[in-house]
Image: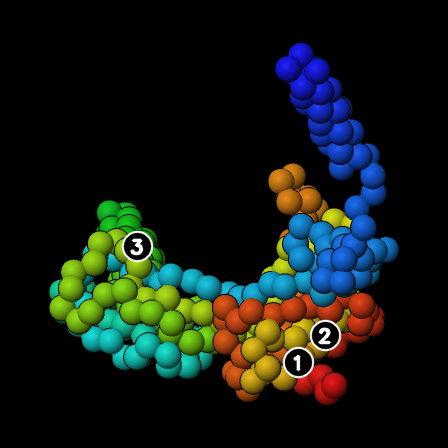
């Protein structure tokens, strides 16, 4: 019985030693790849970066954005009387888009126009001056027969009429300025397109009252279009304004186009270590929308002074 007990102790002791040795070998011995192990196939292949690009990959994904985007508002408080455009409609710079109710201001403008166009006060002052000057000339010709007071009164009358004519002219100038002012106030009841573009959204509707400088509609310019990408700092170091690159939509329904670097941010984003780069893309046909996912191939560099309006053929 004692011999059997000693044998059991030795077995447990060697089992413990073998377990420790196996654990040490598992940690220190290099793993061997099996037939389905990717580590064997990828040995020597550079690992992908955090943004999904492998070293040497110079394609950066971004999106398209309008060249200009503006929320248009009236400069006066009022009720919307008419919308002259619909969402999605293309408009020219200066086109009338919205009118507010402005009957009172229209009346004020009309009164100012009538006063500005009238020269009756000037004409009357000129007639009175002509009469006073003729009367003064008559008294002067009388010579010694004219009393001193009569000559003095004639000269004073002529001077008064000259001042009245100058005052009438000054009032007429003020009337012209007032008319210009009233027309400007009337124009503030209207909203016009500030640039060529598309009406992307209507924020109000007919009959709604809007406050001063409250947004009524949104206008975007899509020609040219911008491709905006967050470029890794090490890649952006070789990019310059005026360089031309191929811009490929992620959706293959849109063919690639050329884009010209328009803006390179002087600031590196500290968190992502990327630099904002914007490329100008010609979009005269209006086929490319804003917000389209695109990839810019920065391995296709070429200096160009053109706008990059052409389609790139692969």
Q: Quadrant of residue 61?
A: bottom right
The nearer-to-camera label among 2 and 3 is: 2
Residue that mark 2 sits on: 246
Residue that mark 1 sits on: 256
Q: Are marks 2 and 3 in contact (CB under 8 Å)?
A: no
| Image mark for residue 213 | 3
Q: Earlier in the sequence, mark 3 or mark 1?
A: 3
Q: Secondary structure at mark 1?
A: loop
Q: Earlier in the sequence, mark 2 or mark 3?
A: 3
Percent coordinates x, y for residue 64 in the rendering: 56, 68
Q: Secondary structure at mark 2?
A: strand
Spatial CA span between label 2 and label 1: 7 Å
Q: Quadrant of residue 184?
A: bottom left
Rendered residue at 68%/44% (across/down)? 273
Residue 258 appearing in the image: yes
Q: Does residue 205 sit above or below 274 in this rendering?
A: below
Q: Residue furthest front?
A: 1
Rendered residue at 27%/64% (across/down)? 203
Q: Name the side, left or right, on which 146 lies relative to 231.
A: left
Q: Earlier in the sequence, mark 2 or mark 1?
A: 2
Rendered residue at 65%/69% (across/down)? 295
Q: Residues within 10 Å of mark 1 (few under 14, many from 20)?
A: many
- The quadrant of the image that shows the C terminus is bottom right
Rendered residue at 70%/77% (across/down)? 258
Q: Are marks 2 and 1 in contact (CB under 8 Å)?
A: yes
């Amino acid at each position: 019985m004692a011999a059997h007990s000693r044998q059991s102790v030795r077995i447990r002791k060697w089992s413990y030693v073998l377990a420790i040795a196996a654990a040490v070998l598992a940690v220190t011995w290099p793993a061997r790849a099996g037939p389905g192990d990717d580590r064997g196939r990828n040995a020597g292949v550079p690992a992908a970066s955090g943004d999904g690009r492998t070293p040497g990959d110079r394609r950066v994904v971004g999106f398209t954005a309008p060249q200009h985007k503006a929320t248009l508002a009236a400069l006066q408080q009022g009720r919307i009387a008419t919308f002259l455009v619909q969402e999605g409609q293309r408009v020219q710079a200066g086109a009338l888009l919205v009118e507010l109710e402005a009957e009172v201001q229209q009346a004020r403008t009309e009164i100012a126009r009538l006063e500005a166009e009238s020269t009756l006060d000037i004409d009357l002052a000129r007639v009175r001056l002509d009469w006073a000057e003729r009367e003064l000339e008559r008294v002067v010709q009388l010579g010694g027969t004219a009393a001193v007071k009569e000559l003095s009164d004639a000269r004073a009358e002529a001077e008064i009429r000259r001042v009245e004519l100058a005052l009438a002219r000054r009032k007429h100038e003020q009337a012209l300025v007032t008319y210009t002012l009233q027309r400007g106030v009337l124009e503030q009841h209207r909203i016009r397109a500030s640039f060529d573009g598309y009406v992307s959204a209507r924020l109000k509707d007919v009959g709604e009252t809007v406050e001063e400088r409250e947004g009524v509609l949104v206008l975007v310019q899509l020609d040219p279009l911008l491709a905006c990408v967050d470029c890794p700092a090490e890649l952006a170091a070789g990019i310059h304004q005026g360089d031309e690159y191929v811009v490929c939509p992620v959706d293959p329904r849109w063919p690639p186009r050329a884009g010209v670097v328009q803006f390179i941010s002087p600031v590196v984003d500290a968190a992502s270590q990327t630099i904002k780069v914007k490329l100008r893309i010609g979009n005269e046909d209006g086929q490319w929308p804003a917000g389209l996912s695109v990839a810019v191939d920065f391995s296709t560099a070429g200096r160009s002074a053109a706008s990059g309006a052409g389609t790139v053929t692969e």
